[in-house]
């Protein structure tokens, strides 16, 4: 990942944000695959890495805002456009557009991963409820030998 030097220019900041966000998107894709494959043992390390990347993105955004404010630009859309136009690098605007598009992708990946995590949690709760019932003297099977489990407890994979 890129790290900032003192008084960075717009292109340097935006490239660092884009590179960090690309790492985050790839990590979210890996997380989705692990969730679909029910490989939940790897989730704690992925969560830790995600937190680090998000923290770094927040730091870079603050540096961008500080740099913009120090240069006399407002911290709104109009100020952003003016700041991008003032940059020495011609590709700042395209990097910004790519950064915004990638942010949308990251948000959607995170939303879907959240759904998958909730599905795993619900499945785990269902399994615990069944085990609790059995531990209290219940049975998984009725007198006719048929399962007492409801058909609606089957797993559903989203993705």
Image: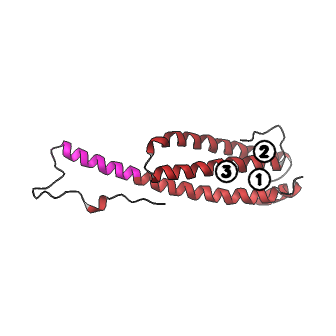
Q: Nearer the viewer, mark 2 or mark 3?
A: 3
Considering the numbered disc 1 on the image, is that residue within a helix, a strand or a loop?
loop
Considering the numbered disc 2 on the image, is that residue within a helix, a strand or a loop?
helix
What percent of the width, then of the height, locates residue 22? 67, 51
Would residue 27 be counted in the magenta stretch?
A: no
Vertical position of residue 100 compared to residue 38: above or below: below
Q: Which disc is residue 22 wearing?
A: 3
Q: Residue at x 63, y 59 (%)?
A: 104
Q: Which residue is mark 1?
A: 75
Q: Which residue is mark 2?
A: 66
- Looking at the image, do the residues carrying marks 1 and 2 touch, with CB atoms under 8 Å apart? no
Residue farthest toward the top in the current orientation of the protein: 6
Label 2: how many Cα within 10 Å (few below 14, some 14–19, many 20+): some
Give the quadrant of residue 83. Answer: bottom right
Q: Count the marks: how many?
A: 3
Specify whether 20 is left or right of 148.
right
Span highlighted in magenta in the image = 120-138
Q: How is the image coloured?
A: secondary structure
């Amino acid at each position: 990942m890129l790290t900032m030097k003192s008084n960075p220019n717009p292109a340097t900041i935006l490239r660092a944000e884009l590179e960090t966000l690309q790492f985050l998107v790839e990590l979210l894709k890996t997380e989705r695959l692990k969730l679909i494959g029910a490989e939940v043992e790897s989730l704690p390390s992925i969560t830790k890495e995600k937190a680090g990347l998000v923290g770094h993105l927040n730091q870079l955004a603050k540096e961008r805002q500080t740099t913009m404010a120090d240069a006399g630009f407002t911290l709104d859309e109009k100020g952003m456009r003016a700041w991008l136009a003032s940059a020495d690098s011609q590709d700042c605007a395209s990097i910004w557009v790519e950064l915004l598009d990638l942010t949308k992708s990251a948000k959607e990946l995170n939303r879907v991963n959240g759904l998958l995590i909730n599905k795993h949690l619900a499945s785990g709760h269902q399994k615990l409820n069944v085990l609790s019932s059995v531990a209290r003297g219940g049975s998984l099977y009725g007198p006719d030998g048929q399962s007492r489990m409801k058909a609606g407890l089957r797993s559903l994979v989203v993705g």
